[in-house]
Amino acid sequence: MEQIRPILKGTQVLVMLVITGILLYACVTSGDSHTYTVSNDAVAQVVRDAIAGDHDAAPLNGLPAVDCTGERNCTIAYTVQQPKGGLWAKEGVADLQLVEPTRQIWEALFTDPQFQSGIIRVRGPVTTIGGKAETGVYYLLTCDRDTASHIDWNNVDGKGIRTFCDYQAQTQGLPGYTRPGAAR
């Protein structure tokens, strides 16, 4: 596994270059200055590419929903398929499959100088207390430009993203989950 990590890191860097290229493609030119613009379609494509390009990420189940307001703030929601085994037992596995893939999304968003903050809501298969299978919210992750300025997106891991950005686990078994009504 340790021999594969450098290859996976290289693949992730390549994906990041593709994502940045997509954002740059949506460039609006005015004279000699360039303004890079976040748009619903461009961000949806970044999400699809980031998840599909991350070998460890839980695959998407459907298309992402994106709502960017005035190119300054975006709300992104997507649903993933069942994460690979062991997700609920180990913090590192949840970070690797669910949280780390967002770093490529955040890095791309913050290349737009107008973009200020965003919220990512990740959903996926859960089992209710009554034993029924349904789709539930795994977590919410909010990050703003000030926080992003302290993050090296090429080197941060899932735990680092959860620590810097505002991470709120919504499903039991995820790192940082607190039962509703429980003292924190």
Image: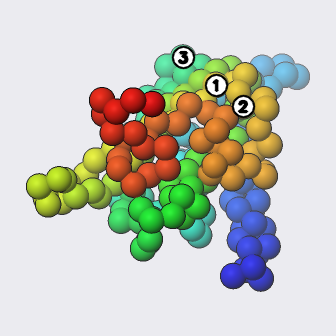
Give the structural element (helix, strand or loop) at label 1.
strand
In the displayed orientation, state which residue is furthest to the top.
70
What percent of the width, then of the height, locates residue 152? 80, 43
Q: Please indicate, yes or no, whether residue 148 appears anywhere in the rendered image.
A: yes
Labelled disc at residue 148: 2
Q: Answer with the quarter of the image where residue 86 lies.
A: bottom left
| Disc 2/disc 1 C-alpha distance (Å) | 6 Å
Q: Residue at x 79, y 73 (%)?
A: 6
Q: Residue at x 88, y 22 (%)?
A: 32
Labelled disc at residue 70: 3
Q: Are marks 3 and 2 in contact (CB under 8 Å)?
A: no
Q: Are marks 2 and 1 in contact (CB under 8 Å)?
A: yes
Labelled disc at residue 77: none
- Residue that mark 1 sits on: 144
Mark 2: give few (<14), some (14-19) or many (20+) Cα within 10 Å. Answer: some
Q: Nearer the viewer, residue 26 or 164?
A: 164
Q: Residue at x 42, y 73 (%)?
A: 85
Disc with the residue nearer the chain's start (3 vs 2): 3
Quarter placement of the C terminus = top left
Disc with the residue nearer the chain's start (3 vs 1): 3
What percent of the width, then of the height, locates residue 19? 67, 50
Give the structural element (helix, strand or loop) at label 2.
helix
Mark 1: give few (<14), some (14-19) or many (20+) Cα within 10 Å. Answer: some
Give the structural element (helix, strand or loop) at label 3.
loop
Q: Nearer the viewer, residue 151 or 72?
A: 151
Q: Is residue 54 above or below residue 149?
A: below
Does residue 97 appear to the left or right of 113 in the view shown?
left
Callout count: 3
